[in-house]
Each structure stands twice: as structure tokens, then as C-alpha cells.
């Protein structure tokens, strides 16, 4: 009889204390759900960078034989400005539209041009650049690799100083196309850094130069291209985390 009571107690005690021990143990927290970075929405930002390109002044026939190269030189300098855009993300694909406006100090010159027409020089400067471009990219959570392409407008001025006679000038808003690529990384919820390269195809445009002598106007076909590298920071609205 005593043995039967001891056996019963051995079965009852663990059964009674087991639930209590389980209740005393802390509940295991559920694993947090993974939430990738959201690139969708409106953003604005600032950028700085540098540009380098080439200018070629070609004879248009007003002073000689068309097509003769009268001047060729490089331009270079800084740029800085802002951008604004909108992205739409589907899975890991991001598409968007971006407006970019920059003031620049890009300029260059040649000390002796139009050889045979006196000691003239030629110089150019780009005052501003505006682009409107579409973007398409592929995300790696907080990193975005993208390509872009669209339209470009440049405000620029060309000078042709002729010692003893004055300076002939021509100004224009030149338009062309641009292609680019870049990488952007979100280092905090709304903020991201980017590194971007742009190529500008600006073609050849005929410009009329006017000077201090009334009625003395000449033309030149100016061909140019431009490369730009810039770094920037963006602030993204409607960021979910």
C-alpha cells in the first residue's frame, strides 16, 4: 500500500508543478517581419560636382571656306544646384522622373584662334544647366543602382576678343540630350547619398557674333560635348521607416 502511494505521488507532483514552471518562463517574442527600404515617393536634394568638355569653332562660310576648324579647346569647372523627383517602386524595380538645375563655373579658352585674321582669342562659359530625365533602377534594399536619360538645356556665352577692335559675343540657350548612371544609398530613413555621371550630347549650332562695329556680324558653327560627375544628398518624403 505504501509503495502504491509513493508511486502515485511521483506521478502527481511533476504534473502539478509543470504548468507553473511553464507559466514562470518568459514568452518568446515573435520574429520581426523583414521590411525592405521603400524608394517610392517625392524627393528633393542638393548636389555639387565638376564638368569637363570640348568646344570646336568651325567656319560657317561667312569668313572663308565652310568646315575649317578655327578654334578647339577644353572647358572645365565646378557646378552646384538642386534636384527634385518622384519614384515609383514595384518589387525591386524603381522608375521615376527627375528635374535637375545647376549653376556652373565651367569655362575655357584658346589664346590664338582664327589664324590669319589677326591676334584673336576665343573663349566660352556655361552659366547654368537644366535637365529633365527619366530614371530606371534596381534596388538592393538601401542601395539603388540606376540609369537615366532625357533632355538638357545650357545657358552659355561665347566671346571673340580682337585687340584694338573690341569683343564680338554670342549667347544662346543650347539644347541637347543626356545619358547618365549612378548609385544612391539611403543612410537613414529619409536621407540618401548619390554619386552620378552624366554625358551631354550638344551637337553643332550656328551662332551669329555681334561686336562694337555696327553691321559687322560673323557666324561660326560651334560643336561641343560635356561630361559631368556630381555627388548629392536627397530627402525623401513619405518614407515608411
Image (cartoon, rainbow, N blue to C red):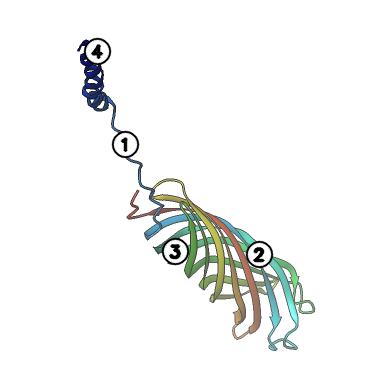
Q: Please identify, in this view, whether the residue under mark 2 or under mark 1 is nearer the observer.
A: 1
Q: Is residue 239 left or right of residue 117?
A: left
Q: Residues within 10 Å of mark 4 (few under 14, many from 20)?
A: few
Mark 1 lies on residue: 29
- How far apart in space, not on screen, are marks 4 and 2 (Cα)? 104 Å
Residue 75: which numbered mark, if any? 2
Mark 4 lies on residue: 3
- How far apart in space, not on screen, are marks 4 and 1 (Cα)? 45 Å
* Between discs 3 and 1, the one toward the N terminus: 1
* Between discs 2 and 3, the one toward the N terminus: 2
In the image, residue 125 above or below residue 207: above
In x, y percent, where is residue 70?
74, 78
- How far apart in space, not on screen, are marks 2 and 1 (Cα)? 62 Å
- How far apart in space, not on screen, are marks 3 and 4 (Cα)? 76 Å
Mark 3 lies on residue: 94
Residues at badges 3 and 1 in contact (C-beta under 8 Å)?
A: no
Quarter of the rendering occupied by the N terminus: top left
Amino acid at each position: 500500500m505504501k509503495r502504491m502511494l509513493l508511486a502515485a505521488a511521483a506521478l502527481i507532483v511533476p504534473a502539478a508543478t509543470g504548468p507553473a514552471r511553464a507559466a514562470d518562463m518568459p514568452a518568446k517574442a515573435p520574429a520581426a517581419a523583414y521590411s525592405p527600404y521603400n524608394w517610392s515617393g517625392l524627393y528633393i536634394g542638393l548636389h555639387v560636382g565638376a564638368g569637363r568638355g570640348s568646344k570646336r569653332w568651325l567656319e560657317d562660310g561667312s569668313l572663308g571656306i565652310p568646315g575649317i576648324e578655327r578654334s578647339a579647346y577644353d572647358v572645365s569647372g565646378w557646378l552646384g544646384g538642386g534636384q527634385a523627383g518622384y519614384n515609383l517602386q514595384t518589387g525591386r524595380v524603381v522608375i521615376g522622373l527627375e528635374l535637375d538645375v545647376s549653376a556652373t563655373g565651367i569655362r575655357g579658352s584658346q589664346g590664338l584662334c582664327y589664324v590669319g585674321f589677326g591676334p584673336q582669342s576665343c573663349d566660352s562659359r556655361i552659366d547654368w544647366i537644366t535637365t529633365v530625365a527619366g530614371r530606371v533602377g534596381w534596388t538592393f534594399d538601401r542601395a539603388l543602382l540606376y540609369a537615366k536619360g532625357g533632355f538638357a538645356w545650357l545657358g552659355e556665352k561665347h566671346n571673340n576678343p580682337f585687340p584694338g577692335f573690341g569683343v564680338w559675343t554670342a549667347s544662346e540657350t543650347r539644347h541637347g540630350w543626356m545619358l547618365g548612371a549612378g548609385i544612391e544609398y539611403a543612410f537613414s530613413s529619409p536621407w540618401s547619398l548619390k554619386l552620378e555621371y552624366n554625358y551631354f550630347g550638344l551637337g553643332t549650332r550656328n551662332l551669329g557674333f555681334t561686336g562694337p562695329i555696327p553691321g559687322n556680324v560673323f557666324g561660326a558653327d560651334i560643336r561641343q560635348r560635356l561630361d559631368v560627375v556630381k555627388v548629392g544628398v536627397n530627402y525623401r518624403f513619405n518614407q515608411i521607416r
